[in-house]
Amino acid sequence: MSSSPPSSGCIPACTEPSSARWWRGTRCSIAGGVAPRAIRSCSWPTPTSCPSSSRNGRTARSTPTWSAKVTTPRSTRAARSTTRVRSWRSSRRWRRSPRRDSCRRTTCTWRSDTTRRPPEAVRAAIVAALAGRSIRPALVLDEGGAVVEGAVPGVSAPTAMVGVAERGVMTVQLTAREAGGHASTPPALPATVRLARAIEKLHRRPFPRRLSPPVRAMLATVAPHASEPYRWIFGNLAVTAPAVAAALSAGGPELNAIVRTTAVATELSGAPSENVLATAARASVNVRLLTGDTVDAAVDHIRRAIGDPEIAVEVRHASEPSPVSPWRGEAWRRIATAVRDVLGPDVITTPYLQLGASDSRWFTEISDHVYRFTPFSISRAERDALHANDERIRVGSWLRGIEVYRALLRAS
């Protein structure tokens, strides 16, 4: 074995950083615990064959046949002091324990939401400290959109979806009450039935659909790269906006979520025992507010949709949609330049409406340029696995994303 990368053209999982060398944009590091650890040395067997690669360094679907044995310095060794990178295939169930992070030859997996996050009070304190010092960041970059293909109908080129805004978040509790009693003598309309009917009514009366400014900007940006008839449709939204909104809402959960406020019942509770009538049946409804909608307007819609004064509607917590950051100017140019320089000129950088909530919403109080972008190439299967079994990312995509961050920091 040799301490240098193979010369046969294969892209290795890591290179040797002891001499601070970079090889083909990769660095010798591997995830151990919740954060990458420094690598002291790498050893390379002679590969029997090499994986094919595609344009701009995007990894092809073929599986490499080489592996790298990686060791960490003795002072940082833990239970996983020696890691052998192997092939990885997705499954409906976790192929490895989701209790720990791990990296294999082609894929890294994470523990999803089991990773602890700081409380909101800490984020608020950070923003307050910066504001107290009159510090206004020129650019805030948080998690968000990724580099995807096929996200917009008619657009086949890889697209860097940079979130310029995010939807608001609200939790509404629906409660139906009754006197209770024994389940052997149920009333004509138990609280659980009344609550179930309310949930169904809300599901059958969705919020109205429309194209918000971030979505209009996204469609206008990708229009020149779209195939016909999408190029004409996206380029003439003044005429086609209602039809486009209707088509997007029918195009699947992700596209539906960018054109309307969504509401879905997530948590249900009732009686404490199976033979007891519930005195209070409750449902938590998770609401994501489209840019331009408000908390008060959403609550009014929910009450009208349910149409039952016996159902109590209570807002447990809520935040309005974020302000919209500009998709022109110096801050935006730096992001677009970093994407182009690292991922290639064929990648389209476009504004995007962030569907989920991120910590960046706290920083909109002190910065006008808050963006949500994770510069990793994510496939459809990897997007479907977010917060689910086998949440993962390809190693090559991860390393190229790191290069985008480095390019952005250097430009700043």
Image (tube, rainbow, N blue to C red):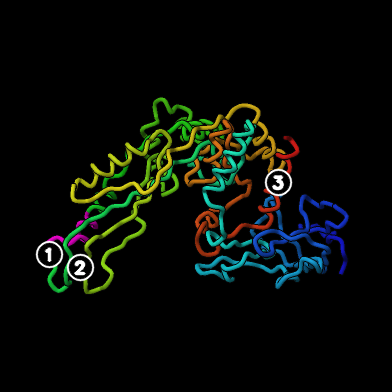
The earlier-in-sequence mark between 1 and 3 is 3
**Quadrant in the picture for residue 52:** bottom right
Q: Label 2 near label 3: C-beta < 8 Å?
A: no
Which residue range is magenta in the image?
188-197
Which quarter of the rendering shows the N terminus? Answer: bottom right
Residue 191 part of the magenta-drawn span: yes
Q: Residue at x 21, y 71 (%)?
A: 276
SS state under label 3 = helix
Position in image of residue 391 (x %, y %) = 55, 60
Give 347 or 293, whichever is nearer the viewer.
Answer: 293
Q: Which amino acid type is shown beneath numbered disc 3?
A: Asn
* Magenta stretch: helix, strand or loop mostly: helix
Residue 279 part of the magenta-drawn span: no
Q: Residue at x 59, y 67 (%)?
A: 89
Position in image of residue 17 (x %, y %) = 83, 56
* Residue that mark 1 sits on: 187
* Residue that mark 2 sits on: 277
The earlier-in-sequence mark between 1 and 2 is 1
Residue 111 shows in this picture: yes
> Which numbered disc covers residue 355?
none
Q: Is residue 264 above or below residue 300?
A: below
> Which numbered disc covers residue 56?
3
